[in-house]
Image (tube, rainbow, N blue to C red):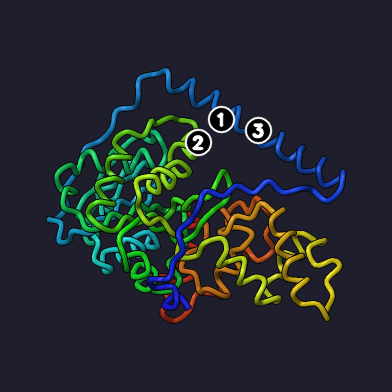
């Protein structure tokens, strides 16, 4: 399935959906939900900006664990409340190293033990231990500053983190899809806040693209506010790279995932549980009308590909990752969230036990 996407990814565009609600109740429910989101964001921004008034936390230095053996770099941002590097995280790092990346591990945990440092040395060429500031973009920006000239001739730069469980299938085809041409690539696209690549996996390919990513990270304004960092980092980053003329695309863009839903009605089963009105009024004798009706209704749903469409990613596209907070928090009450165990096959780089052990470190 993923092999069919090699070289055929569509550019993401500046799209913002402003759907009309069907009834007064739909409009009221939507507005109340938005008010809740606005209040949460306001509290986050005020608190974050207040913390920004203090001196920024002291940051760590780069510890070189081994000489880099590649012009492809991976900056991996991680945080563990128990200051533990799990076997699953090591498996992710190993998968990136086997894909040809020189991996730098950026820890924002309270500490990195000597035992974990020794284990990291087997798969990473560098280790940075820092205080959390600016979230993942702050970690990546800090790493690029410390690496400096090492990135001057880099052919690829992968920005990633530990927010995903897996990989539950081999990563090579997905990385190949992102290195088939120069540009900036992600695995999935989100339309929330405007079309952008989701930041758990961002791969810049080509010397010019890498240079512009490094330049962006050098100048991005860091803050303690999560909402502001999403706007300045995740959302603005894709836009900035498009404006620089880089081919910016997702392996699975919004339209590709939506078409999979429309072409395979069985994939709509879970969404119809979350949104009971989704399948109302469909007429078996009018498939084209049904397709357009479903598409118009999908416009009205705030779908996160890695949450509400998780089962579509896993079942139809054999996706390599599962969002951690889908399993641990499941904010959208997605019924299939506990089913992740059934998608771990014999060729998975991680085992069910490794994922269970990793989840235990987050408690």
Q: At 36% from the left edge and 48% from the top edge, which residue is drawn?
A: 77
**Do tag 1 and tag 2 residues touch (Cβ < 8 Å)?**
yes
Which mark's residue is nearer the viewer, 3 or 1? 3
**Comes first in the chain, label 3 or label 2:** 3
Identify residue for label 2.
226
Q: Nearer the viewer, residue 195 or 49?
A: 195
Q: Quadrant of residue 54?
A: top left
The residues bearing labels 3 and 2 have C-alpha atoms spaced at a distance of 13 Å
Q: Is the residue 219 above or below the residue 333 in the image? A: above
Q: Is residue 331 left or right of residue 173?
A: right
Identify residue for label 3.
38
The residues bearing labels 3 and 1 have C-alpha atoms spaced at a distance of 10 Å
- Residue 265's spot in the image, x, y percent? 70, 75
**Do tag 3 and tag 2 residues touch (Cβ < 8 Å)?**
no
Secondary element type, mark 1: helix
Q: At 70% from the left edge and 38% from the top edge, which residue is drawn?
A: 34
Single out the residue that lies furthest toward the top: 53
Identify residue for label 1.
44
Q: At 27% from the left edge and 43% from the top edge, which residue is drawn?
A: 214
Number of numbered discs overlaid on the protein picture: 3
Q: Nearer the viewer, residue 276 or 216?
A: 216
Residue 213 in sight in this render = yes
């Amino acid at each position: 399935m993923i092999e069919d996407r090699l070289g055929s990814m569509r550019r993401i565009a500046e799209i913002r959906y402003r759907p009309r609600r069907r009834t007064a109740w739909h409009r009221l429910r939507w507005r109340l939900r938005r008010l809740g989101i606005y209040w949460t964001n306001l509290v986050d921004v005020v608190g974050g900006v207040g913390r920004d008034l203090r001196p920024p936390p002291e940051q760590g230095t780069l510890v070189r664990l081994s000489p880099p053996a590649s012009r492809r770099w991976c900056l991996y941002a991680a945080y563990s409340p128990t200051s533990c590097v799990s076997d699953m995280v090591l498996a992710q790092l190993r998968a990136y190293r086997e894909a040809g990346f020189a991996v730098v591990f950026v820890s924002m945990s309270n500490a990195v033990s000597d035992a974990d440092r020794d284990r990291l040395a087997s798969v990473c060429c560098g280790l940075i231990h820092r205080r959390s500031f600016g979230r993942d973009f702050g970690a990546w920006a800090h790493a690029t500053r410390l690496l400096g000239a090492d990135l001057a001739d880099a052919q690829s730069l992968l920005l990633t983190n530990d927010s995903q469980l897996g990989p539950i299938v081999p990563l090579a085809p997905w990385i190949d899809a992102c290195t088939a041409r120069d540009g900036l690539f992600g695995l999935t696209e989100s339309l929330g806040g405007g079309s952008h690549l989701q930041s758990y996996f961002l791969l810049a390919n080509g010397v010019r693209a890498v240079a512009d990513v490094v330049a962006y990270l050098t100048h991005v304004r860091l803050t303690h506010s999560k909402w502001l960092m999403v706007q300045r980092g995740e959302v603005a980053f894709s836009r900035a790279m498009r404006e620089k003329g880089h081919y910016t695309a997702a392996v699975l863009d919004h339209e590709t995932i939506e078409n999979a839903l429309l072409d395979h009605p069985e994939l709509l089963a879970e969404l119809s549980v979350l949104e009971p009105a989704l399948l109302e009024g469909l007429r078996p004798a009018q498939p084209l009308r049904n397709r357009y009706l479903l598409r118009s209704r999908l416009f009205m749903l705030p779908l996160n590909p890695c949450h509400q469409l998780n089962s579509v990613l896993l079942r139809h596209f054999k996706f390599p990752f599962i969002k951690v907070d889908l399993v641990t928090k499941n904010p959208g009450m997605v019924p299939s969230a506990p089913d992740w165990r059934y998608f771990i096959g014999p060729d998975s780089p991680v085992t069910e036990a490794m994922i269970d052990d990793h989840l235990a470190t987050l408690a």
